[in-house]
Image (spheres, rainbow, N blue to C red):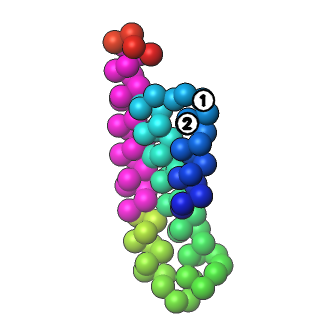
Amino acid sequence: MASLAYTTWWAMGYIHAGAGEAICAYGAVCLFAGFGARWRRRFFGPGQVLEPELYEQLGSWLYRAGVVGVLVGGALYFVQVVAGTR
């Protein structure tokens, strides 16, 4: 998750993204990580045997944070476009 967050931060800085794009990108990272947590739990790895509930809860919370991030970032970007600051 830390490497995903770092590469997102780097990419958003490299393209000089505004707040809306950056929030939306972090939301997408959370969605990706949430999918990954659930996928790993179901198909392979020690999480399948040791802590399946932890992977399920982690995936659920990352999905929720991702959806909120994408929606808030998209709304902020839309407001910037309508206001003409983007």
31 magenta-colored: no
The magenta stretch spans residue 81: yes
* Vertical relation: 56 (above or below) 30: below
Q: Is residue 22 left or right of residue 76?
A: right
Spot the residue most to the top.
84
* Three-letter amino acid code of the residue under disc 1: Ile
Query: Residue 15 bears which disc, if any?
Result: 1
Q: Nearer the viewer, residue 42 or 11?
A: 11
Q: Which mark is residue 5?
A: none
Q: Residue at x 43, y 80 (%)?
A: 53
Residue 68: image location, x then y, percent: 36, 46
Q: Quadrant of the N terminus?
A: bottom right
User: Residue at coordinates 43% horizontally, 56% vertically from top-left?
Assistant: 63
The residue that mark 2 highlights is: 12
Say if mark 2 contacts mark 1, CB within 8 Å.
yes
Q: Residue furthest right?
A: 44
Give the crowd class for mark 1: few <14, some 14-19, many >=20 residues within 10 Å. few
Residue type at mark 2: give it. Answer: Met
Callout 1: SS: loop
Residue drawn at (36%, 28%), measured in percent from left and top?
Answer: 76
Q: CA distance from mark 2 to mark 1?
A: 5 Å
Dominant SS type (magenta)? helix
Extent of the magenta region: 61-82
Helix, strand, or loop for circle 2? Answer: helix
Q: How many numbered markers are drawn?
A: 2
**Residue 58 seen anywhere in this rendered image of the structure:** yes
Q: Position of residue 47 (x, y in %)?
A: 55, 82
Q: Residue at x 43, y 78 (%)?
A: 54
**Of residues 56 and 83, the one drawn nearer to the viewer in this rendering:** 83
